[in-house]
Image (cartoon, rainbow, N blue to C red):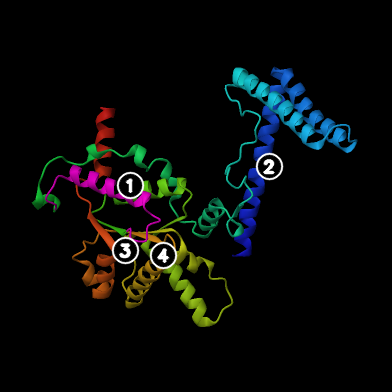
Amino acid sequence: MGKNVYNLIKSEYENRQKKAYHSLLKRRTLAYSKVPLLEEIDRQIKISGIKYTKMILQKSLPSDKAADQLFKKISHLKEEKKQLLEKHFNDPDYLEIKFYCEKCRDTGFTVGSNGVEKCFCFKQQYIDNLFTQSNIKLLDRENFSNFNENYYPDIVDPEKYGIKITPRENILKIKSRALSFIDNIDNPEEKNLFFSGPTGVGKTFMINCIAKELLEKGRTVLYQSSPSLFNTINQYNLKFQRGEVFEDTVYKSIYNVELLIIDDLGTESQTAARYAELLNIINIRQENNIRRPCKTIISTNIGINELNQFYGERVVSRIIGGFDLFKFAGEDIRVLKKLSENNKLK
């Protein structure tokens, strides 16, 4: 891991912890001021622990009996405290510290079956720092809660749309498959997704919907445009050929992240090396997927029938074999939204 990246992440986690404790202190000050009995209860909880520890050390009470009394005493105090918080703040956990990530308590690490390991939030934070071009910020508005099938025509027109069903039926079918993909990402048999279709028919929106859901489930996601992705690989190759000393964590992330999204495939510069790189990415990720989640989504304006002209038979064969292919169809949604906004202003 790059030292600068690590220091940035470490600083972020330190800031998160400071904010969490500062927020708790503010809530505690307010609570004690508004309900003085809460401060007295917290004091009694502390005193109880000290009192029963002293009794055990002095052997004036058997340890098991002391522990039982202490448990009952503190449980009673905590229950009284929760009732007061519920009554005055509508939150029984109002005086509990609230972390950005409850799983690791904003440390970046958790204890798993293999000992201490990086939390999923740490892994995602790392990837976000490495790939600053990732459009993760779009996910607050491009997600399934804002999905609207009414933007897609409810008429059958194979000549115009290139599909035998209505664009609305088609997008609902794609949405259903996307949800299945999310639910079954751990299944090695679950195929990758290949989205094709003209500009403005919702390919990137659907991708962002999937990314949003997986991020909320604690999965790592890397979203890159095709030109940016291949430029990263090209820079790695150039440094390697020059014999430069460098860290290859950026390059490795492309092959190891749980979901790699390659958007706008075909907009990168067309060279023979790019074809080989794409084939390499697909092959390695599919091999990795046998042991752990390593899925890929590709989006392009190029139809599957045209791919052979751009990337050759071997690449197309791997895509057809390892991806479920979906064609997006309909009107340009951006144009429809603009027209709708203009009509509202009239």
Q: Residue beneath label 3, please?
A: 267
Mark 4 closeness class: few <14, some 14–19, many ≥20 residues within 10 Å? many
Q: Nearer the viewer, mark 3 or mark 2?
A: 2
Mark 2 closeness class: few <14, some 14–19, many ≥20 residues within 10 Å? some
Residue 317 vs 34, above or below: the answer is: below
Residue at x 53%, y 67% (from the top left corner): 249
SS assignment at label 1: helix
Counting from the top left corner in percent of width and height, residue 202 is at 28, 48
Magenta region includes residue 186:
yes
Residue 332 seen in the current view: no
- Horizontally, residue 262 falls left or right of residue 132, namely left
Q: Main secondary structure of the magenta part?
A: helix
Q: Are the residues flagged by discs 2 and 4 in contact, CB closer than 8 Å? A: no
Inter-mark Cα distance, 3 to 1: 28 Å
Mark 1 closeness class: few <14, some 14–19, many ≥20 residues within 10 Å? some
Counting from the top left corner in percent of width and height, residue 49 is at 79, 33
SS assignment at label 2: helix
Q: Residue beneath label 2, please?
A: 18
- Looking at the picture, which amino acid does disc 3 mark? Thr
- Looking at the picture, which amino acid does disc 1 mark? Leu
Q: Nearer the viewer, mark 4 or mark 1?
A: 1
Residue at x 57%, y 21% (from the top left corner): 90
Q: Which residues are magenta?
A: 163-190
| Residue 229 circle label | 4
Inter-mark Cα distance, 2 to 4: 36 Å
Which of the 4 image quadrants contains residue 310? bottom left
Q: Nearer the viewer, mark 3 or mark 1?
A: 1
Inter-mark Cα distance, 4 to 3: 11 Å
Inter-mark Cα distance, 4 to 1: 26 Å
